[in-house]
Image: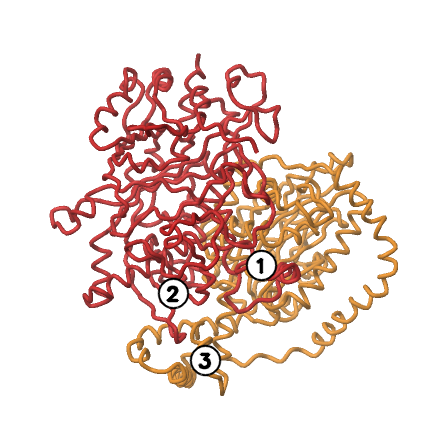
Chain colours: A red, B orange
Amino acid sequence: MPPVDTSDVQGLIRYGYGKLTEACFFLLRIDSPAAARQWLKTAPVTTAVEMKPPPKVALQVAFTCEGLQALQVPDEVIQGFSPEFISGMSGEESRSRRLGDLGANAPSQWRWGGWDKIPHALVMLYAEPGLLETWKQTVKGDSWDEAFSILDYLETEPLLDTEPFGFKDGISQPKIDWEGAQKSAGGAKVDYSNLVAVGEFLLGYSNEYGKYSTRPLVTRGDDRTAGLLPAEEDPDKRDLGRNGSYLVFRQLAQDVSGFWRFMDQQTKGDPAARTKLAEAMVGRRMNGEPLVPASVLPIEGIEQDADSVKLNQFTYASDTEGTGCPFGAHIRRANPRNGDLPYGTDGLLSRLIRTLGFGRKGIRDDLVSSTRFHRLLRRGRPYGPGPSSAGLRSVENQERGIHFICLNASIGRQFEFVQNAWIMGTKFDGLSEESDPLLGNRTPVPGCSFTNAFTLPQENGFRQRINGLPQFVTVRGGGYFFLPSIRVLWYLATIGD
Amino acid sequence: MVVASLAANREGELRSLLASMNVRPGVVDPHNSVVPFAQFERLHFARLLVLADSTLDDIREHGVPPPAVVTSLTFLGDCDGAADDFLADLVQRAGNGLRRIFSHCEGFAPNGDLLRWMKDHSQPPAAMYVNWIGRTVEQIREENFLRNALAEYLDKHWAALAVQSPRQIWEELIAFVRDEVEARRLDLTPPQPTPLGWWLRNLIHFVGVPVILLLLTPALILYLPVFLYQLRVREKNDPEILPRPDLNHVKHLADLEDHDVANQFSALGGVKPGLFRRWTVTFLVWLLDYGARHIFNRGYLTRVNTIHFARWVFLDNKQRLFFASNYDGSLESYMDDFINKVAWGLNLVFSNGVGYPRTNWLILDGAKDEQKFKRYIRRHELPTEVWYNAHPGITAFDMERNSRIREGVEKSFMRDEEIREWLKLI
């Protein structure tokens, strides 16, 4: 695999900009395509090139399908994007059903992103403390006001390592295999690996199947696309996706006081028990440590420093009964840490037997998919009054939460699968009557009048079940964006010339 | 499965009639006046759809004209017991509605013998998969009710039970169930004995197929090198036909999905021309049927445990193959299972279909090409206009779990370890 040209990649794919603790996001409608293109030509978009010293500010730009249309990208190019991107997050009722965007989560209730409030562009600004305001003015430049109207403006809270409920966050990320070091692209990986093919996050590169995810390939001969790179699998075509990615954005409001109030009610205010219950729902301690012991053997793609080993070197192979970390805990749902044949095999014969469907150890064996096809690169930011002000009454009514942002090369197979089958799924891993304890919408499903339980398996086999979980997280907005490469940004900027 | 050609210009009318059976697209009214499915206590799943094949012309890529087929209607259901008895019952209780439906078909005489007509238009499956052979609708309902009652009891009495030993809990639960059964709030109907005739036929099939295979072995071994040569030539040259499915078609399919924890899937495609593919697919589907009947009949089709019922039906003198299944989860997760768990199995059968992603040695690659395979699936999928599921909210996993829960209630003795395992199920 050719090495990635980082100067063509927007930096967000490689960096979370952790040092740039201030950020804000503009959701824009394009009023004047010509002015928008003019703005794009001079926009100082940050690339993934490693800089020393690191940048003090950063700018990233992404577009929805409507946004590309507004920029007058030809329809035959747009049709090359994946169906989910074209349809958009709120574009079809069936999608809303799968994503759990029902009831209070329904797009009709959203601040932005519902059918009549779809942004064209997402402009993301990051800065070191104190620099954001000036950076905003710099980025806007001369043509901004003519080019865009602001559909919504999302502020963020200075990035700490905890999310609004008070848990350490952003601990586990897939490690991108930039060098293409994996031997078995496309082959089976029996054990869980955290090293994931570039093509799972960056379009135009080989993914975990050894194939290429859907993005527009255009035929040569069109001068406007002359600056684009050839497609790896079809060099006669130009790859409009290469070095870009799909960006999923969801504004998630968190009912922080409701969350802790519920823990208090369940534990009659016992401070230790209250924390323990919340930790069981998350699947980690508040300080980030997992609820299951570290695995003895290293895991591919997880560093060997003490912190990484403590926080991330684990799978659930040691906890097949869910007594350490409940099956339904948030992090176990979001990343079940499965290999292709959970939990491993002892050689060729056993692999063959398992492949044919024999050798099951129990009823719960092999219920959850292999994880490597369903990984997300998370780039979220908290918003609203931060944890430092958690106790103040005056902020209780102010909305807070997370701007959940993730990058993936296949919205359907990665984000939507995780959200549907694992997070919202009321039948995940053999469970019933419960969805994600944090994110679940608690909407009844046919044949089951409630989905608001949370099961805590116990050592003696007798489970404890918490019933009546209220909705803790509400979707306030969302959209599917395309985060183009630098070359494609230029293509978009010059498309009308 | 009944398949009948539509009369000229009646498709639109028929689709409206079918739509009238739904509350909204994808959600049937189980008590609808045309076929009130819920009245039929032996019926697990049923569907009605129009077999309109937009991929017929694909076969031209092989230099062969498409078969002359008329758009047809199909009606299929999965029931307990003998299919003939069920059909008779259906005609008895929903005859008028069925007549209304079939009156859109060619040569249907409204005053004729409906049962005879349906039997005459039946297409037997070439292979049939049942998640758990012998598990009845009644059993599934009763066992799910039992599990829910136990779960509720545990929730309600949790504090008192938590201090007891697993054995004491088990004993208390058994006593609870006994009381509930006596009070007629719970039913646990004993299973019906397997009909002797069925059992005998099954036994003969179980032994007969391997005997035939054994007899054929010398010939098969001799033929193998030739077979491999013929296969490889075709695998290298057969065209892949994998355009992106029409977005409106995909949207229409998606509209019908994910209203329940289970979903339906119906698909139709042409078999590649020539005797080689025809015989290969016939032989493999025959083996598949054997496997489903005698090996994979306890909750799993190889590694996949989310399929309730599936069937493979040849149409039009084996020029086309129809596939229908009822599965748990979304189509995306169903395809995920196909690709990551059982691609080899799909390749065996469907690589004989026109346009399928290129395979190697019959089992390799093919469905492993994720995006091509997904395009193939969606393009060949047909909207299932009417779909009935007698078990909303209950997955195949739930059914197996519930049966195990019942076993534990009916046992007179369990070791401590067994009790612990049993308690974990509730």
Q: Split into 4 quadrants, where in the image is the C terminus of chain B?
A: bottom left
Q: Is residue B129 above or below residue B9?
A: below
Mark 3: which secondary structure?
Answer: helix
Mark 1: which secondary structure?
Answer: loop
Q: Chain of mark 1?
A: B
Q: Which residue is mark 1?
A: B304
**Amino acid carrying mark 1 in the image:** Val
Q: Is residue A267 above or below residue A46?
A: below
How many marks can you see?
A: 3
Quadrant housing residue A407:
top left
Q: Earlier in the sequence, mark 1 or mark 3?
A: 1
Q: Residue at x 80, y 51 (%)?
A: B279
Mark 2: which secondary structure?
Answer: loop
Q: Residue furthest bottom?
A: B412
Expressed as whole percent of the image width and height from the top left, the position of residue A446 reads 42, 59
Few, some or many residues within 10 Å of mark 3 (<14, 14–19, 20+): many
Expressed as whole percent of the image width and height from the top left, the position of residue A122 reads 34, 30
Q: Chain of mark 3?
A: B
Q: Which residue is mark 3?
A: B419
Does residue B319 appear anywhere in the picture?
Answer: yes
Foreground mark, 1 or 3, reads 3
Q: Which residue is mark 2?
A: A324
- Left or right? Give the position of B361 relative to A260: right
Q: Residue at x 35, y 62 (%)?
A: A450
Few, some or many residues within 10 Å of mark 1 (<14, 14–19, 20+): some
Foreground mark, 2 or 3, reads 2
**Amino acid carrying mark 3 in the image:** Ile
